Image (cartoon, grey):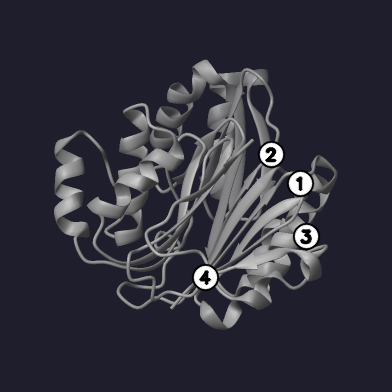
Amino acid sequence: MCGIVGLFLKDPALEPELGKYLSSMLKVMTDRGPDSAGFAVYGRGTDGLAKVTVRLAGADAQATLLDGLGARFGGALGVTKRSSHLVLTVPEASVADLTAAIAEIAPAARIASVGANMEVYKEVGLPADVSAAFGLETMAGTHAIGHTRMATESAVTTDGAHPFSTGPDQCLVHNGSLSNHNNLRRELRHAGMSFATENDSEVAAVYLTAEMAKGKNLGEALEGAIGDLDGFFTFVVGTRTGFGVLRDPIACKPAVMAETDQYVAFGSEYRALVDLPGIETARVWEPEPATVYFWEH
């Protein structure tokens, strides 16, 4: 059992409040996932620049990494520190060089996300503590997704926390369990895709990345997932401009959605949505089984 939430803003006037609303939604889902929590926030970004979010605990380790990167990238490197995560900004053409340098200087570091707009944060701990550590309430953006985890099939680690990001500006949160993830992982590896964990949810994220690499948009990739993924699942996924929801054909995992002229919201339970503006007059519904819901800016 896990809790997942998502918020896609139609009204730019709400963008400064995105983090505040998502933080509230995550905290309400604490009893569905007290082991770890994480979230992805999509901001406006800056043309020509890319962001690499790095997980690396310890002030000394972070300082060593930044000293080494500073010597290589100089003034082209932008740095934002948020607890155990660093958001590093470089010209888009330098992303590969940056990720290679991170692996060389700090082998213990983990890349949480790469993208022009997206930043991913996740840690072991209660959702309220994780949100506070990274300052989620102060973050602005266009859309965001979040997850509270109750580990049932693997250890409680930050590597196992959601969201899983396996492509630029792409991420996924998942409630459920996939039954064909081992076979699908082998097929995707044979096709050249890579994995950082043994988590079944990462397989779903990599699958969508592989499908979008073929030229599909998020909605089309989710359509394919209905037939290619087996098990019980509810997904909320994000791309640079898109926000999607999918439940498996049996749809035994709880889900509720709400839509107004200002936003589209998702929660594992309705109580995750009660603090959103105008929720009293929103269109509220339970997403249908094997049905793709997809919005795009």
Cα–Cα span, label 4 and label 3: 21 Å
Three-letter amino acid code at the position of disc 3: Lys
Rounded to the nearest angstrom, the CA distance separating label 3 from label 1 is 9 Å
Of badges 2 and 4, the one in the foreground is 4
The residue type indicated by label 2 comes to Gly
Q: Secondary structure at mark 3?
A: helix
Tell me where residue 36 appears, x and y as whole percent.
51, 70
Q: Are marks 3 and 2 in contact (CB under 8 Å)?
A: no
Q: Residues within 10 Å of mark 2 (few under 14, many from 20)?
A: some
Q: Are marks 1 and 2 in contact (CB under 8 Å)?
A: yes
Q: Dividing the picture into quarters, in which one does residue 259 lie? A: bottom right
Instruction: Classify residue 31 as left or right of residue 275.
Output: left
In the rendered view of the protein, which quadrant contains the C terminus? Answer: top right
Tell me if 145 is positioned left or right of 198 in this view. Answer: right
Could you tell me how far apart the alpha carbons at marks 1 and 2 are, in whole angstroms?
7 Å
Q: Amino acid at mark 1?
A: Ala
Residue position marked by numbered label 3 in the rendering: 20
Q: Position of residue 212 (x, y in %)?
A: 37, 34
Residue under numbered circle 2: 43
Dot 1 or dot 2, earlier in sequence? 2
Mark 4 nearby-residue class (10 Å; few <14, some 14–19, many ≥20):
many
Q: What is the distance, in whole Å, between disc 3 and disc 2 at their CAs?
A: 14 Å
Which callout, 2 or 4, points at the residue further toward the start of the chain? Answer: 2
Q: Which type of secondary structure does the marked residue at label 1 adopt?
A: loop
Regarding mark 4 in the picture, which secondary structure is present there?
loop
First in residue order: circle 4 vs circle 3: 3
